[in-house]
C-alpha cells in the first residue's frame, strides 16, 4: 500500500533531529535522524531505534467548504525551501474515542477552530496527517509539517494556539520532534 509510511528513528536519515521532547505522556528514545519510507512487505529498512507507521487517509471532519479552501491554499510536501520539519505524534484519550462523530467534530471545529486556525498558516506550512489508531500503533496520529527556516517562529505560534484549544484536553500523549533536511534532494 503506497499511502502507508514508516517514520524510522535512528542514527542516519534525510531529516536530522534538532530537538525532541515529550509535550505530555511517555517520551520515545532519543534519535539523531529520521527517514520516511513507504512501507512494503517485508520491511526493507535498516535497523532502527524505533519506527512509527501511519496511513495517509481520507478526511473525517472537514466539510465541503473547508476541503475547497484547504486545497486552494495548501502546498505539497517536498518544497526545496522547506528545509525544516516537525513530526508530532499524538494519542487521544478514551474519553475522545467514546464520543460520537458529531460530538468530536463539534469540539474539533465549532469549539476549537482547528481548521480555521490552521488555514492562517497556509501556504507557509505544508502538512500531511497519517492515521495509525487502527494499526495497533502507540499513537493515533502522526502529524508532519514542512516549512522554511524563517517560518519556524510562525510554526511555534501555530502549535501553541492549537495546544490551548478544548480539543487538546483530549490529548494524552504528544511528542514534538523538530527536524532539518540533511541533503539537497
Ligand atoms: C498547518 C496548519 C494546519 C491545518 C490547515 C490543519 C488542518 C487539519 C484538518 C482539516 C484536519 C481534519 C482532517 C479530517 O477531516 O479528518 C486536521 C486534523 C488533525 N490535525 Fe491539523 N492542521 C494544521 C496544523 C496542525 C498541527 C500543528 C497539529 C499538531 C500540533 C495538528 C494536529 C492534527 C491532528 C492530531 C489531527 C487529527 C484529529 C482527529 O482526527 O481527531 N494539526 N488538521
Image (cartoon, rainbow, N blue to C red):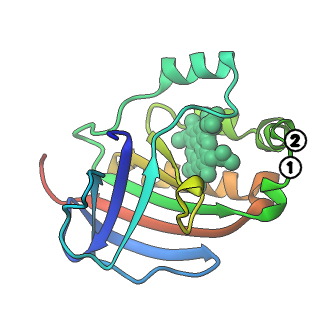
In the image, taking residue 68 as reference, residue 34 lies left or right, namely left
Number of residue marks: 2
| Occupied quadrant, residue 63 | top right
Specify the quadrant that holds the N terminus.
top left
| Occupied quadrant, residue 76 | top left
- Residue at horizontal 50%, vertical 76%? 21
Where does residue 184 sit, x and y in percent of width and height? 12, 49
- Residue at horizontal 26%, vertical 51%? 40
Q: What residue sits right under mark 1 in the picture? A: 99
Comparing 62 with 15, the one in front is 62
Split into quadrants, the picture shows ligand 1 in the one at top right
Q: Residues within 10 Å of mark 1 (few under 14, many from 20)?
A: few
Q: What residue sits right under mark 2 in the picture? A: 103
Q: Are marks 1 and 2 in contact (CB under 8 Å)?
A: yes
- Residue at horizontal 40%, vertical 73%? 19
Where does residue 168 sit, x and y in percent of width and height? 74, 58
Cα gap from disc 1 to disc 2, whole angstroms = 6 Å
Q: Residues within 10 Å of mark 2 (few under 14, many from 20)?
A: few
Q: Is residue 132 above or below residue 70?
A: below
In the image, taking residue 116 as reference, residue 128 lies left or right, namely left
Where does residue 13 sit, x and y in percent of width and height? 20, 64
* Residue 8 image label: none
Where does residue 94 sit, x and y in percent of width and height? 79, 63
Inspect this view and state whether residue 157 appears.
no
Name the secondary structure under disc 1. loop
Name the secondary structure under disc 2. helix
In the image, farthest residue toward the front: 42
| Occupied quadrant, residue 97 | bottom right
In the image, taking residue 124 as reference, residue 70 lies left or right, namely right
- Residue at horizontal 54%, vertical 69%? 175
In the image, taking residue 169 as reference, residue 44 lies left or right, namely left
Amino acid at each position: 500500500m503506497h499511502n502507508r509510511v514508516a517514520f524510522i528513528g535512528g542514527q542516519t536519515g534525510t531529516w536530522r533531529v534538532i530537538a525532541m521532547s515529550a509535550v505530555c505522556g511517555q517520551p520515545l528514545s532519543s534519535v539523531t535522524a529520521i527517514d520516511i519510507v513507504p512501507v512494503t512487505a517485508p520491511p526493507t529498512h535498516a535497523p532502527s531505534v524505533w519506527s512509527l507507521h501511519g496511513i495517509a487517509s481520507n478526511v473525517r471532519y472537514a466539510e465541503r467548504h473547508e476541503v475547497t479552501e484547504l486545497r486552494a491554499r495548501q502546498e505539497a510536501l517536498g518544497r526545496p525551501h522547506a528545509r525544516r520539519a516537525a513530526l508530532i505524534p499524538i494519542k487521544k484519550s478514551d474519553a475522545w474515542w467514546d464520543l460520537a462523530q458529531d460530538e468530536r467534530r463539534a469540539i474539533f471545529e465549532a469549539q476549537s477552530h482547528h481548521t480555521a486556525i490552521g488555514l492562517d498558516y497556509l501556504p507557509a506550512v505544508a502538512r500531511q496527517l497519517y492515521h495509525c489508531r487502527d494499526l495497533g500503533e502507540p499513537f493515533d496520529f502522526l502529524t508532519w509539517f514542512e516549512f522554511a527556516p524563517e517560518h519556524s517562529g510562525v510554526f511555534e505560534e501555530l502549535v501553541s494556539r492549537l495546544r490551548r484549544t478544548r480539543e487538546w484536553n483530549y490529548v494524552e500523549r504528544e511528542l514534538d520532534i523538530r527536524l532539518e533536511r540533511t541533503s539537497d534532494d
